[in-house]
Every structure is written in structure tokens, then in C-alpha cells.
Image (spheres, rainbow, N blue to C red):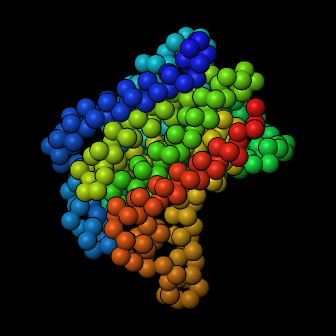
């Protein structure tokens, strides 16, 4: 195996493996610590009544896979940094900024013993600022263009920069909050995001062989996060011993859309993130229909995973179906972008 093949194939696999082991070890340490700090989850009053039994389960567990992924990625990606390739660090730092916003939200919830943390306006302002800075960084570094790539058709359309930046900020904030909505039952956001990370890792690994892609080390980030999530799932699968909290879900949302923009193909979020989109659209439809009909509902409860839960699906069944659907969509998306380079 030559150096190029090692960087494209073996290095992401090693990164994922080390992140997996690190997450397992960190889980053993962090979960008791979170319990000792009384960092327990408050359950929404409007949620399913049987979720009340989950009250007190440690939250902010997202620090487990965040730390594991960051450690592994930096360990195996440092040589890339020394060679002048920073793209994997750009996405990591961007995701950690959103994770920090989530941590503040979780901290307020835990400190005040309530289910509401930062206000909606506070979160929106912070998220908009982070998205704008990240997009400016990608543009400055040459990883972002105003040529919108269309998967499956393998064509691009040039868009005015101002229009594109407004579109991009809207997509990022929407995507992050869609992932946040998906984190509603044990393991769901973790399981759904793992195939997405696998998609980005495999695609970036293959594209890194082509110099014109500008991707040299980017595959390390999704590979590390895949491994970290796999280790975290051991503790987050039903019945969950720990929740990721907004710390984890906002980090994951930023990771998903951050990778899509770093690879200059934001529209790929439609197939790979269809579950996230369904979660968000279900809430929007429910609210609009409720207002228009003065109290009637389309779904038994939203986001839509709660509708299936209220219809008799177990949490494990919802986790399995949503994860498998995402896996199939990611496989289709890979076919759709395979001919870009």
C-alpha cells in the first residue's frame, strides 16, 4: 500500500477505531461523573408520559463522542496540519462552537432544573454568527465556491455570492436544529448520524485521491466521529444510560452540514439528511395545521418519531427503521456524487 492509499483508506479506519475505544473508556469515566454532578435530564411536560421514567438520566453526554473524535482526529491528522491541510480542523472547530452553544443550553437546564435553557433568540443569534464565520472561513480557504453542485445530475450552477451566503446560513441553522429535534428517543440521533458520517468519510477518502478536490485530510473528521458515535451508542442505546443533550446534538448538526459545505455539496443534505428533514417538517406541519383548524392535529405527536411511538412502535424499532432508511439513502447519495471527480 502506497502513501496515498494509506492516507485514503487505512488512516480513516485507524481514526475511527481509536475514537471508538476512546469513547468506550470516556463513557466509563464521564457517566458516573455526570451522575455525581446531578446533571440529570428534565423531561418535557408535553412528551409521552412514559418518558417520565427517564428523568434524572445524565445529560451532556455528547462530550463523550466529541472528546473521543477530537482526540483521534488530531492524533492521526496532525501530520496533515503540518503539511498545510487544515480542512478537518475547520469542521471540528465549527462543530465544537455549536457544541459549546449546546453546552451552555444544557448547563442552564441542569442548573435551573428545567427543560428550557437558553432563549430561542440567544441560540439563534449565536448560531447565525457561528454559521457566518464558518462560511467566510471556507470561502477564504478555497473550500467553498458559489457553484451549487447538483448530485445525481453532476452539474453545477453559479449563484450570486450574497444570495448563496444567505442560503448557506439558512441551511446550516436549519440543519443543526433538525438534528437537535431528532434527538428525542434513546439512540436515535446517534444511530441516524452514523451512516451520514460513514457516507462523508468514504466519499472524502475517495475524493482525496484527486488533487483537484482540495480534500486531503477531511475524511478523518467523519471517520473519527463515526467511531466516537459507535462507542457512545453502547451507553446511549435503549435503555439509555446517558443522553447526548444539546451539547451533542448541536455538535452533530454542525458536523453534518459543516462537512456538506466543506465538500462544497450542500444539496447532498437532502438525501442523507432526509430523516432530519422529516422531523422538522412534521413539527411545522403540525403547528400550521393546528392553527388553521383551531386545534386539530395531523400527527399524534411531533417530532414524527413521537407519532410512531404513540402508534405503538418501540424505541428500538424506531431507531432501527430510521437508521436503516438513512443507511439506504446514504448509499443512494454516494452513487449520486460518485461521478463528480
- Give x and y (percent) for residue 170: 64, 52
In which quadrant of the rendered image does the N terminus lie?
A: top right
Q: Residue at left 62%, top 35%?
A: 203
Residue sticking out furthest to the left: 36
Please name the residue shown 59% across and 53% down the image: 329
Is 14 positioned to the left or the right of 241 in the image?
A: right
Picture quarter with the C terminus: top right
240 shown above or below 265: below
Left or right, 155 with reference to 197: right
- Residue 60 appears in the figure: no
Seen at 65% across and 25% down, the residue is 208
Q: Is residue 219 left or right of residue 68?
A: right
Against 297, residue 242 (above or below) is above
The residue closer to the viewer here, 264 or 164, is 264
Residue 322 appearing in the image:
yes
Query: Left of 151 or right of it: where is 11?
Result: left
Can you give x and y, in whole percent of width and height, for residue 46 in the image? 35, 73
Amino acid at each position: 500500500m502506497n502513501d496515498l492509499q494509506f492516507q485514503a483508506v487505512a488512516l480513516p479506519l485507524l481514526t475511527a477505531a481509536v475514537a471508538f475505544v476512546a469513547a468506550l473508556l470516556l463513557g466509563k469515566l464521564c457517566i458516573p461523573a455526570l451522575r455525581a454532578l446531578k446533571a440529570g435530564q428534565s423531561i418535557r411536560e408535553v412528551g409521552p408520559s412514559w418518558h417520565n421514567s427517564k428523568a434524572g438520566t445524565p445529560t451532556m453526554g455528547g462530550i463523550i463522542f466529541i472528546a473521543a473524535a477530537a482526540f483521534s482526529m488530531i492524533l492521526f491528522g496532525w501530520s496533515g496540519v503540518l503539511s498545510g491541510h487544515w480542512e478537518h480542523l475547520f469542521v471540528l472547530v465549527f462543530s465544537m462552537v455549536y457544541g459549546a452553544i449546546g453546552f451552555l443550553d444544557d448547563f442552564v437546564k441542569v442548573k435551573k432544573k428545567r427543560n428550557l435553557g437558553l432563549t430561542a433568540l440567544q441560540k439563534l443569534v449565536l448560531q447565525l454568527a457561528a454559521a457566518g464565520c464558518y462560511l467566510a472561513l471556507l470561502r477564504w480557504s478555497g473550500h467553498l465556491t458559489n457553484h451549487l453542485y447538483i448530485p445525481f445530475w453532476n452539474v453545477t450552477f453559479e449563484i450570486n455570492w450574497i444570495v448563496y451566503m444567505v442560503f448557506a446560513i439558512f441551511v446550516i441553522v436549519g440543519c443543526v436544529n433538525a438534528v437537535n429535534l431528532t434527538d428525542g428517543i434513546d439512540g436515535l440521533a446517534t444511530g441516524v448520524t452514523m451512516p451520514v458520517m460513514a457516507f462523508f468519510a468514504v466519499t472524502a477518502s475517495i475524493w482525496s485521491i484527486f488533487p483537484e478536490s482540495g480534500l486531503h485530510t477531511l475524511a478523518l473528521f467523519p471517520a473519527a466521529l463515526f467511531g466516537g458515535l459507535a462507542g457512545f451508542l453502547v451507553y446511549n442505546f435503549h435503555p439509555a444510560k446517558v443522553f447526548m443533550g444539546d451539547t451533542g446534538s448541536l455538535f452533530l448538526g454542525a458536523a453534518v452540514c459543516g462537512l456538506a459545505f466543506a465538500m462544497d455539496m450542500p444539496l447532498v443534505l437532502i438525501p442523507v439528511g432526509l430523516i432530519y428533514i422529516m422531523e422538522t417538517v412534521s413539527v411545522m406541519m403540525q403547528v400550521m395545521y393546528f392553527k388553521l383548524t383551531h386545534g386539530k392535529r395531523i400527527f399524534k405527536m411531533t417530532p414524527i418519531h413521537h407519532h410512531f411511538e404513540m402508534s405503538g412502535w418501540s424505541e428500538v424499532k424506531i431507531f432501527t427503521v430510521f437508521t436503516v432508511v438513512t443507511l439506504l439513502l446514504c448509499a443512494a447519495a454516494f452513487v449520486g456524487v460518485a461521478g463528480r471527480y
